[in-house]
Image: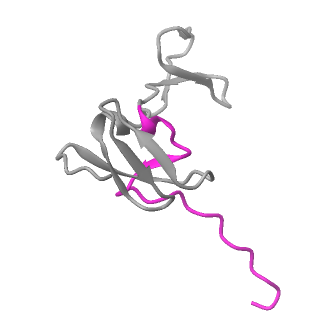
Amino acid sequence: MTSTDSADVLLVHSSPLGTLAIPTPDGRLFMAEPGVPVALPADVAGVEPGEWEALPDGAVPDLDDGRTWRLADSGAWQVRAPGSGLLAQIDVWRRADVPAAAQTPAKKSKED
């Protein structure tokens, strides 16, 4: 089933699970094949997590405020909005107009 809703967002997934069936709250079902753009309702697509921002020196994180926290290699705390919907899964879903992460270049053989 496809949608013609103007609020749709084109997403692509790279899940190793193959074709995914994406249900919507209103009872529709969308089939998403790996690497093939699929138009999904904006509320299902969601939003990507925000950018990581450093806390000021000496600031203490509030780990229960709904944001995502991490400790950087420098020892400083960083925070970001976690995102929502499918786009919160940054390792699986992306907008179709955003290029896939760069692939690891193939190693050159000795014959090259």
**Is 26 placed above or below 64 here?**
below
Q: Nearer the viewer, residue 37 or 105?
A: 37
Where is residue 109 drawn, in percent x and y? Answer: 79, 83
* Residue 17 picture location, percent across and down: 61, 51
Residue 28 quadrant: top left
Residue at the spot x=29%, y=41% of the render? 41
Q: Residue furthest right?
A: 110
Judge left or right: residue 109 versus residue 29: right
Image point (43%, 62%), residue name: 36
Residue depicted at 53% across the width and 8% down the height: 64
* 63 sits left or right of 98 in the view: right
- Per the rendered image, the range of residues in magenta is 85-112
Q: Main secondary structure of the magenta part?
A: loop
87 or 77, nearer to the observer = 87
Q: Residue 8: image x %, image y %?
A: 25, 46
- Foreground residue, 101 or 59? 101
Answer with the quarter of the image where residue 22 lies. Answer: top left
Residue depicted at 28% across the width and 38% down the height? 42
Percent x, y for residue 84? Answer: 41, 30
Residue 106, picture quadrant = bottom right
| Residue 46 visible in rendering | no
